Image (cartoon, rainbow, N blue to C red):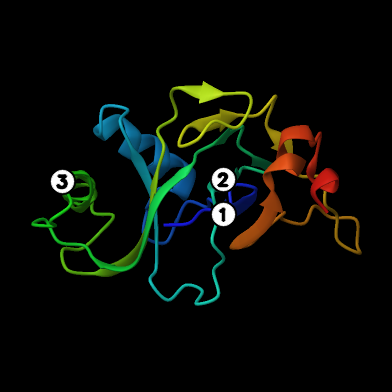
Amino acid sequence: MTNDDDNVLVVASNRSSQHDLPGAWELYRDISAAMNGRISAYICQPARDLTIQVVGRIAFYSSGRIEPLVPAVIDRLDDEEMVSSHKNPDLRKIIVHLIKQRVLRNGQRNRVFLLSPPEPAFSAPKARCSIKLRKPIPNVKMDKNGDRSPFTYGKRYVSLAALLTANDSDDLE
């Protein structure tokens, strides 16, 4: 897989209150813990966006901020069948864990980004390792009425260079 290491996909990490499912940020940390800190994942619908760009990293927008941990994309599987007998041993363990958590159903199809775990994290880019930003990046976006407006509802692309120097979301525009 070819990664554009400066291209970061920022995903909204909203918890699903309708189905009582954890958000993407919570799942990233949960999967990492279940995998003993060796690997993690971001899992979304297979056809969520057919024009998704090649990215080197994923950042999580949660609770009005971009979380300070930015994992590296290790692999991307675009239309993967999520079965407990999966041939990839890491993905199989992740799938079994998420089926037990009732996050996935055996046999459903998803896009999967295998990600670097939270630790070790570095303050500067290092291949296949997570990056720790100086601090969370708060969202300061306002709509025309002066109300807070989400940085992203689903996904958004930013450069890693901008993330590393941003003080708030205005620095990413």
Quarter of the image that includes the N terminus: bottom left
Q: Categorize mark 1 by other alpha carbons within 10 Å: few (<14), some (14-19), many (20+).
A: many
Residue under pointer 2: 60
- Please, is residue 53 above or below residue 21 in the view? below
Q: Residue at 91%, 62% (x, y): give it.
A: 145
Q: What SS does tag 1 mark?
A: strand
Q: Categorize mark 3 by other alpha carbons within 10 Å: few (<14), some (14-19), many (20+).
A: few
Q: Are marks 2 and 1 in contact (CB under 8 Å)?
A: yes
Q: CA distance from mark 3 to mark 2?
A: 26 Å
Asked which quadrant contains residue 155, the reply is: bottom right
- Looking at the image, the residue that sits furthest to the front is 2
Comes first in the chain, label 3 or label 2 = 2
Q: Nearer the viewer, mark 3 or mark 1?
A: 3
- Measured as percent of width and height from the top left, residue 67 is found at 60, 36
Q: Are marks 3 and 2 in contact (CB under 8 Å)?
A: no
Q: What SS does tag 2 mark?
A: strand
Question: Which three-letter amino acid code belongs to the residue tagged 1?
Answer: Val
- Looking at the image, the residue that sits furthest to the left is 85
Residue under pointer 3: 89
